[in-house]
Each structure stands twice: as C-alpha cells, then as structure tokens.
Amino acid sequence: MRGDAIVLGIETSCDETAVALVRADRRVLSAPLFSQLAEHAPYGGVVPEIAARAHVEKLDQLVSQAMAEAGIGFRDLAAVAATAGPGLIGGLMVGLLTGKTLALVHQLPLVAVNHLEAHALTARLIAGTNFPYLLLLVSGGHCQLVAVEGVGRYRLLGTTIDDSIGEAFDKVAKMLGLGYPGGPAVERLAREGDPGRFDLPRPLHGADTCDFSFSGLKTAVRHRILDLGPTAAEPAIMADLCASFQAAAGDVLVDRSVRAMRRLRAGGGGYRVLVVAGGVAANLYLRGRLEQVAGTHGFTLEAPPLALCTDNAIMVAWTGIERLRLGLVDDQTVAARARWPLEELAPPV
Ligand code: KG4
Ligand code: ZN
C-alpha cells in the first residue's frame, strides 16, 4: 500500500461525531470533531435518541469540512472506514450508512471498524508500535486487558464483571454534582485532595484474575457521601473523596496490569509494551501509576496523546488503513452491531 493512500474515517458510536482523513504514512490531514456534550449535559449522561439525531445533523457537514481542510476530492481516497460497533445502535447506523453510501457512490472499498480495535491500534499510528503488546482498554463502556497479537487477533485476559472504570468515574462525579462526563472533573479535583483520607475498597485486589470490578468501589463512595451528610459538599472534602476514589481505581488497574504482565512474560511471546487506550487513559494520574509499574516489570508504557484517548475518527481511519493493507474489507451487507467483542473479530487468514 502506498504511503500517500488516504482513508476517510467516520466515528459515531457514542456522543462524538467525528470525521478524519489519515494517510498510510501516518499523517493526519484533517480531523473535525463535534462533541455533543452540551446536548446531553442536562440529562447527566448520553441520551441515545438525542445522540443519533445529532449525528444525522452534523455528519454530512463534517465530511465536507474534512475534505475541504485536506484540499482533496473523493477520487483521491483509497477507502472509507466507519465504526460499525460496539456502541449506541442509532448512532452506529447513521455513521455506517453514511460510510456505505460514500463507498458505493465513489466506488471505494469499505471497512466496517470495531471501535475497540480502533482504540487498540491507536498506538501503532502514534508510535509505530510492533505486535505483540498488552493493551489496557479503559473507557466509558469497557475495562479490559487484552493480548494484542495482530490486526484482528485479540486474546482477552480480563474484563469487568460489572461497571466499566469510566462509568465509575462518571457516577462518582454525578454523586458529587460535578456534571457529565465526570472523568476529567474528578481528576481535576483529585489533584487538590488527600488520597489517604478515605479508606475505600479495592475490589478483587490480589485475586488470581485479570478481571475487574468497580461497583463495590462506587457504592462505597456513595456510603461515604451519605455518612458525611452536608459536609460532603465542602470543596476540601470533595477533593479528598475524588483523590481517594482515584487512588483506589489506580490500585485496581495497577494490580490487574501487573498480573497480566506476569502472565504474558511467563508465556514467552516477546511482550514488552503496555499500551493504555480509551477515554480514561486521558487521566494523567493513572498514566503516571501505569508508567511506573510497567517500568518495574520490564515493560514500556505507551499512551496516546489525550485527544486520541477519547473517541475520535483518526483511530477509525487508521484501523481502515491497517485492515485495507491486509485486504480485510467489508461489503455492503455488513450491519451495525451494538455488541461486538474484540475476540469476535475475524482474524486475517
Ligand atoms: O473512550 P471514550 O471517549 O468513550 C467510550 O468509548 O466509552 O471514554 C469516555 C470515558 C468517560 O467515562 C469519561 O468520564 C472518561 O472516559 N474520561 C476520563 C478522563 N477523561 C475521560 N476518566 C478519568 N479521567 C479523565 N481525565
Ligand atoms: Zn471509545
């Protein structure tokens, strides 16, 4: 595949409408993004119907904007890549249908992208990371440890048995009246707080598993807030609650990542890189903890720049490039999927 091949990426799986044009030589030509935050904020979370409508309203103009900013026409494209799942089905259908139409009209190959694979492969766009590597995927919908063996080849080592870590951040933020999305707000407040102030549980800590659990931690925060009564609203106490919660979440990520690193080292196979991806990977405290623990276990941490941790279309276009290179294209019959685990991806033959 030529280095100047350009792929158009479309991302509409949740509350970000995003389009990007990326070249096979890893140059990003344009990446306009519309965040629906203001639309969902009054409801304290993403409302699927509102999200789908906002994607319909914004997507066409974002495609035109991306093409204009890059100064190219559709005949200059090598393929169209659109997120087909997992995520909110209404938004996925909007993005995938737009991608299918563009591919059909302009006679281009179509790549139906798995959103989790897009997060998983971002490190290769940023740093050219070679396979295999250990992936810690931490987002609003997922919390997983995955052995990434190649494009389409993922081995799940552990996943959450209840809430995702992003959900836990968002729920703690909601309890404290910090608004949505809560992750960045909790991180900001935690910087001023004392992580040792409140003794919170570390679910599954030390257990012989790479699985995660966050609901007990979230509930413990709720109980602390109830016990504190009105004092829970004092800025210094809120900061201590956020710092204590974030430290507990960090301990859980570190404990499970260490287990996964040990398992992979014991199994051979040359795993030396820990990649962290997904929205929660934008958290600098958690990145610092993971960097430190990766170092002590002979791994290097690779974390994408913050804008590429949260949802974006650059990672979707890049996944299109990775798949196109291997001839892994889809036809017009491909359907959007609300649920689509990484392990169900078709590996290259
Ligand atoms: O990957 P993402 O943009 O969307 C999904 O695919 O889920 O992740 C969104 C999640 C939200 O739960 C948000 O609160 C969390 O990522 N998040 C953070 C931070 N920035 C975003 N969590 C903790 N600290 C942050 N700085
Ligand atoms: Zn995501």
Image: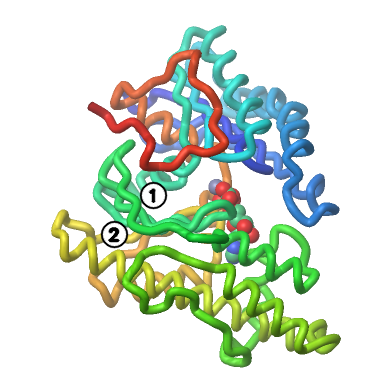
Residue at the spot of label 2: 273
> In the displayed structure, would residue 199 be above or below residue 204?
below
Residue drawn 49% across the image and 20% down it = 334
The Cα–Cα distance between marks 2 and 1, rounded to whole angstroms, is: 10 Å
175, 328: nearer the viewer: 175
**Between discs 2 and 1, the one toward the N terminus:** 1
Q: Residue 53 is drawn in which quadrant?
A: top right
Quadrant in which the N terminus appears: top left
Residue 261 position within the rendered picture, expressed as x and y whole percent measured from the top left: 27, 66
Quadrant in which the C terminus appears: top left
Q: Is residue 214 visible?
A: yes
88, 182: nearer the viewer: 88
Residue 35 position within the rendered picture, expressed as x and y whole percent measured from the top left: 71, 44
The residue under label 2 is which amino acid type?
A: Val
Mark 1 near ligand 2 (CB under 8 Å)? no
Residue 314 position within the rendered picture, expressed as x and y whole percent measured from the top left: 51, 38
Residue at the spot of label 1: 123
Image-based side of 49 in relation to 134, left or right: right
Q: Residue 273 is drawn in which quadrant?
A: bottom left
Residue 180 position within the rendered picture, expressed as x and y whole percent measured from the top left: 74, 59
Residue drawn 63% across the image and 66% down it = 169
Question: Pointers 2 and 1 in contact (CB under 8 A)?
Answer: yes
> In the displayed structure, would residue 248 be above or below residue 67?
below
Give the number of the disc on residue 277: none
> In the displayed structure, would residue 191 be above or below residue 141?
below
